[in-house]
Image (cartoon, rainbow, N blue to C red):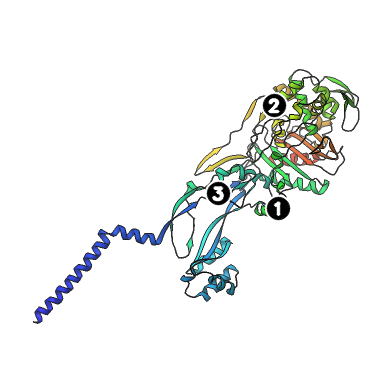
Amino acid sequence: MKIWRSNVVVLVIFLLAAIIIGRLFYIQVLQGKFYSAQALGQQSGFQEVTGNRGQIYFSKSKESLGAASSGDMKSLAINEDTYIVSAVPRMIKDREAFAAAAGKELKITKADMLAKLKESDSYVIIKKNVGTSQADALKSLQLAGLTLESMASRYYPQEKLASQVVGFLGGKGMGQYGLEGYYEDMLAGKKGIQEQKRGLNLIGADALPADLNGSDLYLTLDYNIQFEAETLLAQAKKDINIDSGQIIVIKPDTGRILAMAGYPSFDPNTYYQQHDLGIFQNSAVQKIFEPGSVFKPFTMAIALNEGKVNPETTFVDTGSAKIGPDTVYNFDRKSYGKQTMSGILEKSINTGAVFVSQQFSHQTFMDYLEKFGFNDKTGIDQQGEVVSKNMLLKKGSDFGFATASFGQGIEMTPIQLIRSFAMFANGGHVVTPYLVDKISHGGEESVTKPHLSDQVISQKTASEVTAMMIQVVERGFGNIAKIPGYYLAGKTGTAEVPFPDKKGYYPDRTIQSFIGFGPALKPQFLILVKLDHPNVPKSALSAAPIFKKIAQYIINYWQLPPDY
C-alpha cells in the first residue's frame, strides 16, 4: 500500500515536471521570439525625430597669403541642448521627498512642486528650457517618475556680431533673414524614425542618425575683421551720430566676403524683443541707395574703354554745366578751370563727370550698366536680396543721364557697388561675392568656387582708372585715407538722399562713402564704407578716415609688406 502511494506521488511529480518543462520549452523555444519582442516592446519604442540643425562658423584662418591659422574657429550659430522636465506622479512613492529634491535643483519651492504633481496623475510638465548643468544634476538624483526630454535650441554666442548676416531661427523653427533664411533647406534637420530605449528617467535623441542632421556652414567672414568693422561703425555713431551704416570687406580676386558689418544691429537670441522689423534686414543687400561720386570711376571707365577719352584729355570746368533748362553744379559750387581726366576724379568734379558722359551715347551708358551688373542681383547667399532696374533712368532725359554720371538718379545696393568695383582690381572682371566657403554634411564637403565674369572692360582701362584713383588718395580729396608706405586706390562719395514719395532731395541728409582697394598694384582687399546721414557738413569726408583705419588694421593683421 505504501509502495503504491509512493509511486503515485513520484508519478504526479514527474507529470508536473514534464508539464513545467514542456511549458518552458514552448515559451522559450517555440514562442521565444514572440515573447522576446513583447518584452522589448515594453522597454523600447519608435518615435519620429528631427535631426539637429546645422551650425554656422566663422572663417578658420586669415586670408593673407601664407598666413598661419588665426586660432580656434569661432561659432556664429550653434545648437544648445535644453530640457523639458516632467513627471509621472503615479510612479512617485514619496512625493514630499521628490518635491524637495527636484525642487532644490530647479529652484522651485516644495509647495509649488507638490501643487504641480497634483495637476495630473499621469503626466505633468514641471519646467521648460532647463540648462544642461541642471539636467545633469537631476539625472544624478535617480528619481523614479522624473523624465527629462532633450530639446535642441538655437544659440548665437557672438550676440550682435554679424547678426544681420546670420539672421535667426524663428518661433516656428524656420530660418529668418540672412544665412538662416537663405540656407533653411540645408540647415534644417530632416525627420526620421528612431528606436528609443526607455530608461529610468531619460528620453533623448543623443545619438540621432547622422544623415538626419542639417549641413554645417563654414563662412568666409573673418571674425577679427568683422569685429573691427562693427566697432568702427559703433564709434561713428558716437562721434558723428550716423543714423546707420555699412562696411563691406572682400577679397577682390575671389569675391570672398571678409566682413559685412551693419549698424544698428540686434541680438538674434532675443529677436522677439525687437519692435522695428527693419532692423533684421541686411542693408548691404536689402536696401537701395544713390551712390554719389563713388560712381564716377565707372563713368570714366566707359569713356576710356570706348576710346572717347584718355587720361590726359582735358576740359575746362566753369563750376556748372547747362543741360537743357537745368543746370548741374559741383558739390561745393567751385570751378576748377582746366583739368585732365585724372583731375576729375582727384577733385571729384561733377561737371567733369558730365563732360565725360557726353562723349558716349545714353544707350552705351545703359549697355555698360548691364555689363557691370547694376541691373541684376549679385546672387549673394543672403535671403531677400533686392535690385533696382533703374527704370526712371532708362526713360530719363539728358539731365537724368548727366546726374547719373556722378551717381545721382541712379540706384544700387552696397553689395552691387562693391561687386562691380572689384573689376578695377581684377583687370576688368566683375566678381561674384559669397559668404559661405564650405558646406559640410555627413563627412562630405562642398567648397564654393570663386567666379569671375567675362572681361567687361580691358586690362588697360582697369589700370588707367586704378592709376587715377591712386592719385585721388595720394593728392586728391581722398588723401585723408592715405597710409604711408602703401599705394591705395579709392574714391570719395557724398550723395544727396531723395524723398521716398516725391521728386527732390532732402536738404539736410547725405550719404557719405569711400570705396577703395589695396595695395593698389597687387590688391588684397577691397573696402566699402557707407555712412547714412552723418551729422557733419556736406563737404566733410567722414567715411575716408574710417576706410583708413580698417585698411591699416588689415595691413597690420595680415602683415602686408609696404610698397615703398
**Secondary structure category for the residue under label 1:** loop
Q: Note whether 62 is above or below 16 in the view shown.
A: above
| Near-viewer residue (304 or 266) | 266
- Mark 2 = which residue? 370
Determine contact: label 3, label 2, CB under 8 Å.
no
Amino acid type at mark 2:
Glu
Q: Is residue 466 visible?
A: no
Residue at left offset 51%, top offset 50%: 51
Q: Quadrant of residue 85?
A: bottom right
Left of 376 or right of it: where is 189?
A: left
- Mark 3 = which residue? 53
Amino acid type at mark 1:
Gln
| Residue 526 pos. (x, y %) | 71, 35
| Residue 406 pos. (x, y %) | 81, 29
Return the mark for residue 274. 1
Lower position in the chain sequence, tag 3 or tag 2: 3
Nearest-to-viewer mark from 3 and 2: 2
| Residue 201 pos. (x, y %) | 48, 65
**Secondary structure category for the residue under label 3:** loop
How many angstroms separate mark 1 from mark 3 (CA)? 24 Å
Left of 237 or right of it: where is 387?
A: left
Lower position in the chain sequence, tag 1 or tag 3: 3
| Near-viewer residue (172 or 488) | 172
Residue at left offset 84%, top offset 35%: 504
Q: Quadrant of residue 306?
A: top right
Q: Is the residue marked by circle 2 packed among few (<14), some (14-19), or many (20+) residues within 10 Å?
A: some
